[in-house]
Image: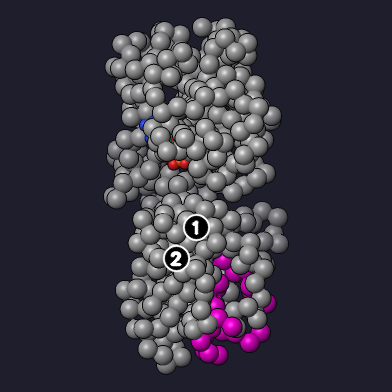
Amino acid sequence: MSNLYDRIIAKEAKVGVIGLGYVGLPIALAFAKSISVVGFDINEERVEMMRQGQDPSNELEGSDFENSDIEFTADINDLKDVEFFIVAVPTPIDEHNKPDLSPLLGASKGVGKVLKKGDYVVFESTVYPGCTEDDCVPILEGESGLKFVEDFKVGYSPERINPGDKEHTITKILKVVSGCDDESLDVISKVYEIIVEPGVHKASSIKVAEAAKIIENTQRDVNIALMNELSIIFNRIGINTFEVLEAAGTKWNFLRFSPGLVGGHCIGVDPYYLTYKAEELGYHARIINSGRYVNDSMGYYIAKQTVKKILQTGKNIAGSKVLVMGATFKENVSDIRNSKVADVVKELRSFMVDVEVVDPFVDPAELKHEYNIDLTEKPGDYYDAIIVAVNHEPYVKMTEGDFKGMLSDENGIIVDVKGIYRGKFENTRYWSL
Ligand SMILES: NC(=O)c1ccc[n+]([C@@H]2O[C@H](COP(=O)([O-])OP(=O)(O)OC[C@H]3O[C@@H](n4cnc5c(N)ncnc54)[C@H](O)[C@@H]3O)[C@@H](O)[C@H]2O)c1
């Protein structure tokens, strides 16, 4: 077993990546620069795009596919001669904010069918501590008829990449790795060291590595929730949160977080995996759940503040016109998964506001399908309020003059969720978190 690494390096053994999304595809391509890789995904359409050198998630360039020893497939049988499996399928939550393990269990089933004695399986999907050994391993054993540790080894290595971030890419960030025993930890570390320049951190167990990932995102979520709560308080006091943060940020140990909408596939989702596990163990996680509550409510809060600002000018709210700029979950990406901008739109519509949405990064069909929102191609000049929900680069460059031509009259207001125009507008009504 221990010479698996040598055989991988010599291209005598293959690495298989299961789930080729934001995480899986960059990993597969990074490995494929030096070793033989099979990239498997259940979505045939996506597989076909990757065969043509296109990233369905719009993160990688055509050139990233060049000089790669990789076979893309949607046929599980093509994984039969793979000996080192990496699983990077989604781990979403359901409508009750409970972990939806179906993609992960489905992938485990698929790998179990082709698993052989001596093989390795490393999970990268974000999960609660215990999920790999308690939920995935029994499926691998059941499907393969093999025994965990004795016949095949398992590890967990969380992913830290960040959509839209061209600096912290897979090969540039230190990676946490773990294994089911010393031997597997050694092999898994060496395999990841092929691609990860800063090297690996060897966690003491699979559960520790799982927990490390989940708290990275939980810590971020809770801190942003604190900023959001502060912004609600400061709004009542009548001071600007970003000004307060700027002042407080001059202290050496003040943590730099800012208020805003928390969406996407990770920060707004992962803490629910931890609270689910805590609940299962008889503990109701108060701080984490409160953070989730505050962050999940921000879309509605921003909409209500906008409604108030329109009403304050004596206008009728029903039939008033609001433009929402930005629909993605963060800046400069096309990803609309779990975007809280949809909450802003929903809440405004509940007040009978006529809402339009623009976003240069978003695929209109996807937005329609996901949230039943029609993307407006070109903004008009009749808005009572404009909510800049996402700090996309083209929006950051906009000036007061650009907005003036879009507002209906001098009572029109700019709602600047991320505080990007703070101090830049002189003659326009302005509000930020
Ligand atoms: N997106 C990120 O920046 C990021 C960062 C760190 C960790 N993560 C974690 O990594 C995991 C993957 O996230 P992602 O953003 O890459 O997801 P994604 O939605 O971009 O991609 C997942 C891919 O897996 C495929 N898939 C689904 N079920 C499958 C199955 N049973 N077998 C094979 N393929 C299957 C899908 O077709 C899709 O192509 C999640 O657990 C996520 O929390 C994501």
Q: Quadrant of residue 188?
A: top right
Q: Name the residue rendered at 33%, 14% in the picture.
A: 144
Q: Name the residue rendered at 29%, 38% in the picture.
A: 280
Q: Quadrant of residue 104?
A: top left
- Where is residue 376 shown, x and y percent of the image? 46, 69
- The secondary element bearing badge 2 is classed as loop
Q: Name the residue rendered at 38%, 52% in the picture.
A: 289
In the displayed structure, 365 sits above or below 424; it is above
Q: Name the residue rendered at 41%, 56% in the picture.
A: 365
Point out which mark residue 164 bears: none
Residue position marked by numbered label 1 in the rendering:
362
Label 2 neighbour load within 10 Å: few <14, some 14-19, many 20+: some
Indicate yes or no whether the magenta region holds residue 426. Answer: yes
Q: Quadrant of ligand 1?
A: top left
- Where is residue 215 shown, x and y percent of the image? 49, 41
How is the protein colored in the picture? one colour
Mark 1 belongs to which amino acid? Val
Residue position marked by numbered label 2 in the rendering:
375
Of the pair 409 and 420, the residue shown nearer to us: 409
Of the pair 229 and 378, the residue shown nearer to us: 378
Reading the chain from its start, which is encountered first: label 1 or label 2? 1
Task: Left or right? Give the position of 348 relative to 21.
Answer: left
Label 1 neighbour load within 10 Å: few <14, some 14-19, many 20+: some
Of the pair 328 and 310, the residue shown nearer to us: 328
In the displayed structure, 237 sits above or below 34; it is below
Badge 1 vs badge 2, beta-carbon distance below 8 Å: yes
Let me know if residue 158 appears in the view. no
Which region shows up in magenta? 405-433
